[in-house]
Amino acid sequence: MALFRFFPLFLLCISSFLCFCFADDPFVFYDWEVSYITAAPLGVKQQVIAINSKFPGPIVNVTTNNNVVVNVLNSLDEDLLITWDGIQHRRNSWQDGVLGTNCPIPVDYNWTYQFQVKDQIGSFFYFPSLHFQRAAGGYGGIIINNRPIIPVPFGTPDGDFTILIGDWYTQNHTDLRKALDASKDLGMPDGVLINGKGPYRYNTTLVPDGIDFETFNVQPGKTYRIRVHNVGISTTLNFRIQNHNLLLVETEGSYTVQQNYTSLDIAVGQSYSFLVTMDQNASTDYYVVASARFVNESLWKRVTGVAILHYSNSKGKASGPLPDPPNDFYDKTFSMNQARSIRWNVSASGARPNPQGSFRYGSINVTDIYVLKNKPPVTIDGKRRTTLSGISYVNPSTPIRLADQYNVKGVYKLDFPNEPLTGAPRMSTSVINGTYRGFMEIILQNNHTTVQSYHMDGYAFFVVGMDFGEWTENSRGTYNKWDGIARSTIQVYPGAWTAILVSLDNVGVWNLRTENLDSWHLGQETYVRIVNPEANNKTELPIPDNALYCGELQSLQKPQQRHHKKNAASSITGGRWNLLYTLQMTLLSAFLIFH
Ligand SMILES: *[C@@H]1O[C@H](CO)[C@@H](O)[C@H](O)[C@H]1NC(C)=O
Ligand SMILES: *[C@@H]1O[C@H](CO)[C@@H](O)[C@H](O)[C@H]1NC(C)=O
Ligand SMILES: *[C@@H]1O[C@H](CO)[C@@H](O)[C@H](O)[C@H]1NC(C)=O
Ligand SMILES: *[C@@H]1O[C@H](CO)[C@@H](O)[C@H](O)[C@H]1NC(C)=O
Ligand SMILES: *[C@@H]1O[C@H](CO)[C@@H](O)[C@H](O)[C@H]1NC(C)=O
Ligand SMILES: *[C@@H]1O[C@H](CO)[C@@H](O)[C@H](O)[C@H]1NC(C)=O
Ligand SMILES: *[C@@H]1O[C@H](CO)[C@@H](O)[C@H](O)[C@H]1NC(C)=O
Ligand SMILES: *[C@@H]1O[C@H](CO)[C@@H](O)[C@H](O)[C@H]1NC(C)=O
Ligand SMILES: *[C@@H]1O[C@H](CO)[C@@H](O)[C@H](O)[C@H]1NC(C)=O
Ligand SMILES: *[C@@H]1O[C@H](CO)[C@@H](O)[C@H](O)[C@H]1NC(C)=O
Ligand SMILES: *[C@@H]1O[C@H](CO)[C@@H](O)[C@H](O)[C@H]1NC(C)=O
Ligand SMILES: *[C@@H]1O[C@H](CO)[C@@H](O)[C@H](O)[C@H]1NC(C)=O
């Protein structure tokens, strides 16, 4: 469970390749064992996924340009991959942790992720990407700090809280997955967790006794940065703190125009930073609330997360009703206007989106246009499935990126349509053929009855427009060509569209998916494959030495000594990286011994 920070690389430059690749940037090491623990966040005992016995997992707290090394030991009873939501993995889709790029980590195997958090600053999160595991936890926050030379458009806060909110079922993830695979609906969640904990007992009828809730301890007059992530399954949550303004400053690595909100709608997979000033008189503690959005409140009352904001001089417990949510079940205009109001601070430096250093996305010519449309679930071959543009994605047994590397043919098709298909929906491993250095316009059209949020790995995209109805060419007239926010996850309201622009400068194979876990599980995703026609190690890093093999390449996999973390021995047989890792550990031991 060791975290070794800023161990200087110059000691470690044992090959010119690594020096070229990682420059002089510091390394940060994490050692994780992923396993089940028993918890009862809503008063019902269940198996949740913990990291080093913690649920939620530890915060990855690093500085921009750091090289992050995370050794993950899979102590679950099924395959595992961890994905890093919003981390761009520049030139390095090998580390993305989804089935299009990585073979799963088998039970009792460990696998070491190594990636640089290049030119990114802000708030992100990680989660297990396979088998519906996110419904059982395994997630945690990622903080990427600025280096001192990079200014931040606000004063240093007095403290920093990561707040993971999400809908939650008392059924475990294997039962939920089975229900989905048996063409069933998951129904209403049983609650909303805040940092893995159930609601404060604000109402003795609604909340049973004995539930552990989250408390945020603060000092009067101070200002805190709070980083809120919706890590749930499918419910958009309204986040608010009683009597306190939320000053929005950052979303998914971009500094926003700073504005106060009394509450903000956060779709599944989205991340926001707020500055909150403790400017109340602390007559009591205050409620921190995350409540289900766009549902019948009288039926969904129990699907509400409640935590406590406790001033050090508080005069008593929080009591009385929760602060009101927006009251517009039938009208999503308010929420959409709120989403549109989130704009980019174009004069703030630091967190830079693609294209690197360019703020003038509005004047770049679009090279590829895709209209991606999702619909309510359909039946294909007797199974309930979800689709994007009429195609329900099927994961191949050989990851796409690995198949390319080894020239395995027939694993996928580069035939994803520019316009939604009109015929019968079908199952296919259909992938978008991205043009390297192209500028792609993607219109996400939601024909379902619930909010869908979409995420693209490897990139931040510009959000240029959203509106109700069907997108048409004329809709371009409404695009924000100046200060649309650059981010990696955006919501699409039911019966509405959202348009994004993305500069395809990051070579690799990148997942484009709905973050709604149930829709994702049933096929609502694809990949964008971006290849530099002049392949070289400058635009894409070579395959890592520790790559796992599966599917048609299974025979390349060397058996791994199945170890349990506590007595794992370093191996020097695995090539350059393992050698480096071992050397680091040796040097580090020496370093620790002699200090
Ligand atoms: C989930 O619960 C079922 C019983 O409902 C049990 O058979 C299964 O082992 C549980 N899975 C996990 C991962 O705890
Ligand atoms: C993150 O690490 C920095 C030091 O690099 C430290 O100042 C800060 O308190 C840490 N933040 C959290 C939330 O742990
Ligand atoms: C497993 O962990 C050991 C150190 O505990 C490391 O040497 C080895 O490279 C890891 N295996 C992989 C495939 O990452
Ligand atoms: C934008 O960033 C600049 C530069 O850091 C800062 O001075 C300004 O206050 C910010 N503007 C808004 C509206 O957030
Ligand atoms: C608690 O919730 C119940 C059910 O919604 C409601 O009838 C009751 O008025 C609430 N009690 C308080 C004190 O708000
Ligand atoms: C936000 O609200 C706080 C009070 O909570 C106020 O002091 C501040 O000036 C407001 N900022 C903006 C940009 O409106
Ligand atoms: C301040 O506290 C008193 C009770 O001590 C309360 O009556 C009053 O409403 C509070 N004022 C504010 C602005 O919260
Ligand atoms: C919410 O559900 C209740 C109970 O079923 C029902 O009486 C009410 O009409 C519903 N409200 C709305 C806005 O649909
Ligand atoms: C965009 O395309 C127009 C013509 O279609 C051309 O005149 C212009 O130079 C192009 N702009 C850029 C930045 O390539
Ligand atoms: C993919 O796009 C490239 C141009 O970016 C083109 O040369 C190639 O033929 C396309 N491949 C397929 C299978 O359409
Ligand atoms: C879905 O598409 C159909 C056909 O275009 C349209 O009639 C319907 O209103 C759409 N529903 C939503 C929620 O977008
Ligand atoms: C990239 O690097 C790998 C490993 O260092 C090497 O085997 C390969 O030949 C290089 N490829 C190119 C195109 O330079």
Image (spheres, rainbow, N blue to C red):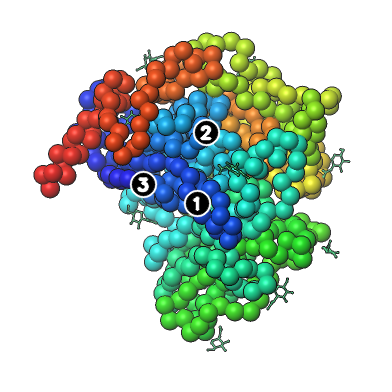
Q: Amino acid at mark 3?
A: Thr
**Crowd class of label 1 (few under 14; some 14 to 19; many from 20; radius 10 Å):** some
Residue 92 in the image: state x and y as whole percent: 45, 28
Contact (CB < 8 A) between labels 2 and 1? no
Report the residue at 23% width, 34% height from top: 584
Q: CA distance from mark 2 to mark 1?
A: 17 Å
Q: CA distance from mark 2 to mark 3?
A: 33 Å
Residue nearest the observer in this picture, 575 or 137: 137
Quadrant location of the N terminus in the rendered image: top left
Q: Amino acid at mark 1?
A: Thr
- Quadrant in which ligand 12 is drawn: top left
The numbered mark, 3 or 1, whose residue comes first in the sequence reads: 1
| Residue 440 visible (yes or no) | yes
Q: Give SS at disc 2.
A: loop
Residue 156 in the image: state x and y as whole percent: 39, 62
Which residue carries the number 2 mark? 78
| Residue 115 visible (yes or no) | no
- Above or below, 457 relative to 228: above
In this view, the mark in front (3 or 1): 1
Q: Give SS at disc 1.
A: strand
Determine the image quadrant of residue 290.
bottom right
Q: CA distance from mark 3 to mark 1?
A: 33 Å
- Above or below, 55 relative to 436: below
Contact (CB < 8 A) between labels 3 and 1? no
**Crowd class of label 3 (few under 14; some 14 to 19; many from 20; radius 10 Å):** many
Report the residue at 68% width, 63% height from top: 302
Report the residue at 68% width, 53% height from top: 189
Answer yes or no: disc 3 within 8 Å of ligand 2: yes
Which residue carries the number 3 mark? 63
Which residue carries the number 1 mark? 38
Residue 212 in the image: state x and y as whole percent: 51, 65
Answer yes or no: disc 1 within 8 Å of ligand 1: no
